[in-house]
């Protein structure tokens, strides 16, 4: 059998239904993006070498990732429900089988799983919700710790040092407890307004701010609007809210 | 686990890693010291000596970092160590917190 050149298929995502479409040179590294359909499924791909994209240049890698997501976004707009695949998902040719055939075979074998995933996200999109508050918001809350502060100023240096440590622990615990209870509260409010919610790891990536909640939400248009309204209320209560999306539904591809 | 040290200056990179690990141990010692102080089993004099010893250890580590210009590197390594520890427990904890 004649092998295609280049022989790999870089796959962005899978959508339901069969469609033939050429998106042009919009892919990672300007590659030509097009569709391959089989078994009622359409894969959005570009031809590539069967080796992963790798770069030590962070800016270049970030650009590739952004391009990857952009292509999925276009596919979502074009075909509706879409199963996003991770960056660098490459199908390689197997013995006497082209990568197109390997891909078609995979779509056939995974047909039920893919259909279930497509059903799950049909008509919905993923949104990111991050809620922050300033660290100083907690410091004013530490009136109960005045006793420790007095002990620090009244003690000799070694003892004061240990009391200072104790004060640090108390402040940290206070922050943790408050964060957990607020996070739970936000979770239950937001859960009411969306189809699904996934709790993501909190990141402390903004100087001077504490991330109280980091959620991925799966919502249809009406739900997204309601969610926006709820987040507006949370913002009015003095919290900083980041509402981003729609994103490819990466966080709703695993088991429920 | 992937902790990066300075490739351009491996000597300083290694020192940074060592100090970061020592700081983690000292943090644990501090926690133990506070617990012992609270247990009521130590005399005032013992508390003062314990606190002074830890304070001096802190100061020495601070001076070492400053004189070798590795304060930021140590902070970075500690954050990486934190990330490793967090990634081991965070998802589990979050699931429990929310449940």
Image (cartoon, rainbow, N blue to C red):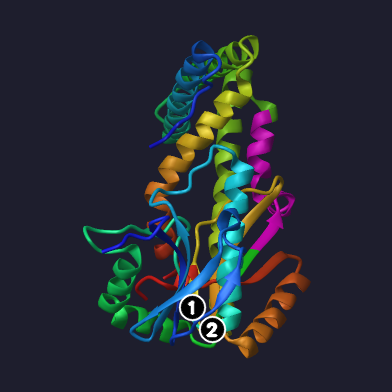
* Label 1 SS: strand
What residue is shown at x 60% (from left), y 15% (from top)? B65
Which image quadrant is residue A116 in? bottom left
Q: Residue furthest left?
A: A95
Which image quadrant is residue B66 in? top right
> Would residue B24 appear left or right of A131 to someone viewing this image?
left
> In this orientation, does residue A21 appear?
yes
Say above or below: B28 vs A55.
Answer: above
Residue A138: in magenta span: yes
Residue under numbered circle 2: A79
What residue is shown at x 31% (from left), y 81% (from top)? A111
Q: Decide: marks 1, 2 in contact (CB < 8 A)?
A: yes
Residue under numbered circle 1: A82
The secondary structure that most of the magenta stretch takes on is: helix
> Would residue A96 appear left or right of A76 to someone viewing this image?
left
* The residue stretch that appears in magenta: A131-152
* Label 2 SS: helix
Residue A94: x %, y % from top left: 25, 59
Say above or below: A215 vs A60.
Answer: below
Residue B22: x %, y % from top left: 45, 21
Say above or below: A174 vs A254.
Answer: above
Residue B26: in magenta span: no
Give the chain letter at badge 2.
A
Give the chain letter at badge 1.
A
How many residues crowd around disc 2 within 10 Å: few (fewer than 14), some, or many (20 or more)?
some
> In this orientation, does residue A178 appear?
no
The one of A32 and A173 positioned closer to us in this rendering: A32
Query: In what quadrant of the picture does the C terminus of chain A appear?
Result: bottom left
Q: CA distance from mark 1 to mark 2?
A: 7 Å
């Amino acid at each position: 059998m004649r092998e295609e050149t280049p022989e790999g298929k870089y796959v962005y995502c899978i959508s339901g239904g069969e469609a033939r479409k050429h998106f042009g040179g919009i892919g990672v590294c300007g590659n030509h993006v097009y569709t391959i359909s089989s078994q009622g499924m359409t894969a959005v791909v570009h031809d590539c070498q069967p080796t992963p994209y790798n770069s030590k240049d962070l800016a270049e890698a970030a650009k590739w990732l952004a391009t990857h997501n952009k292509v999925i976004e276009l596919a979502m707009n074009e075909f509706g429900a879409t199963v996003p695949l991770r960056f660098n998902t490459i199908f390689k040719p197997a013995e006497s089988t082209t990568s197109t055939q390997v891909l078609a075979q995979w779509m056939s074998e995974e047909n039920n799983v893919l259909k279930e995933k497509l059903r799950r996200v049909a008509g919905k999109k993923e949104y990111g919700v991050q809620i922050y508050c300033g660290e100083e918001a907690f410091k004013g809350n530490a009136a109960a710790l005045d006793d420790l502060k007095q002990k620090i100023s009244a003690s000799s240096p070694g003892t004061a040092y240990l009391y200072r440590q104790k004060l640090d622990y108390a402040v940290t615990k206070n922050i943790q407890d408050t964060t957990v209870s607020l996070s739970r509260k936000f979770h239950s409010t937001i859960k009411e307004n969306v189809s699904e919610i996934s709790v993501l790891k909190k990141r402390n990536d903004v100087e001077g701010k504490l991330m109280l909640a980091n959620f991925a939400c799966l919502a249809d248009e009406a739900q997204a609007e309601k969610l926006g309204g709820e987040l507006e209320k949370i913002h009015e209560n003095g919290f900083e809210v980041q509402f981003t999306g729609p994103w490819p539904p990466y966080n709703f591809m695993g088991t429920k | 686990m992937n902790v990066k040290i300075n490739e351009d200056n491996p000597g300083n990179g290694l020192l940074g890693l060592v100090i970061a690990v020592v700081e983690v141990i000292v943090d644990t010692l501090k926690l133990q010291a506070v617990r012992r102080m609270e247990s009521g089993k130590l005399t005032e004099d013992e508390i003062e000596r314990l606190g002074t010893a830890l304070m001096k250890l802190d100061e020495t580590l601070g001076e070492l970092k400053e004189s070798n210009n590795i304060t930021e590197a140590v902070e970075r390594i500690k954050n990486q160590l934190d990330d490793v520890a967090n990634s081991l427990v965070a998802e589990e904890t979050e699931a429990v917190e929310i449940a």
